Amino acid sequence: MRRLQSGVTFLGGLVLVLVIGGWVYVGIRLVPIYLNYMKVAGTLDKVKDEFSANPSNSEFAIRKAVERHFDIESVDYPSVKDIIIKREGSAFQVTADYDDDATIAGNISVLVEFNRTVEVPAN
C-alpha cells in the first residue's frame, strides 16, 4: 500500500522562513519610528486638551507647550521648529507633518510619512 506524503520540503521551509524573517525584520526596524509618532501625536493631543479651557491662547504659548511636552517625552524628531502653528478663524491649527526613514540594509530604506493636525481654540 502506498502512503501519501505531506508537509513542506526543506527548501520550501527555508524559503518560507526567509520571507517571514524578512518581514519581521522590517517590522522591527519600523517599530521605533511609529513609537516616536505616537509620542508626537500624544503631545499634540495633550496641548489641545491643555489649551481648550484657556481662553487666552497665542502661537508662542502653544509652541512653548509643545516644546515642554517634547522635552518630557524625549522627542528629538521632528523638532519644535518643524511643528506648524497657524491661525484659522477662531482656532489654531497645530500640525506635525514630517517624514522619517528606516534603513533596512545598505542603501535600502523605508520612508514613512506622518501628518497629524489638532485644532486648539483661540481667544
Image: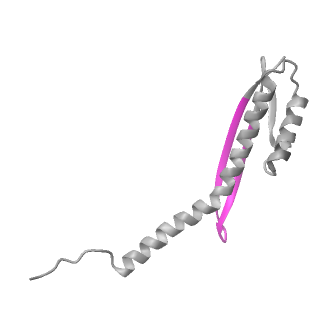
Residue at image point 79% right, 32% down = 47
**Magenta-colored stretch includes residue 92:** no
How far across and how far down the image is residue 56, in percent?
88, 19
Q: Is 64 situated left or right of 44 in this image?
A: right
Colour mode of the rendering: one colour
How far across and how far down the image is residue 74, in percent?
81, 50
Residue at image point 82% right, 41% down = 69
Residue at image point 72% right, 30% down = 118
- Please tell me whether residue 11 is drawn above or below residue 112 in the rendered image: below
Badge count: 0
Q: Quadrant of the N terminus?
A: bottom left
Nearer-the-camera pick, 97 or 70: 70
**Residue at the extreme bottom:** 1
- Please tell me whether residue 18 is drawn above or below residue 85 in the rendered image: below
Nearer-the-camera pick, 42 or 18: 42
Residue 13 lies in quadrant? bottom left
Q: Is 79 situated left or right of 17 in this image?
A: right
How far across and how far down the image is residue 17, in percent?
46, 72
**Magenta-colored stretch includes residue 107:** yes
Q: Is 40 situated left or right of 29 in this image?
A: right
Q: Main secondary structure of the magenta part?
A: strand
Q: Quadrant of the C terminus?
A: top right
- Please tell me whether residue 52 is drawn above or below residue 108 in the rendered image: above
Extent of the magenta region: 95-118
Residue at image point 22% right, 78% down = 5
How far across and how far down the image is residue 41, in percent?
71, 40
Nearer-the-camera pick, 111 or 64: 64
Q: Is 114 situated left or right of 8 in this image?
A: right
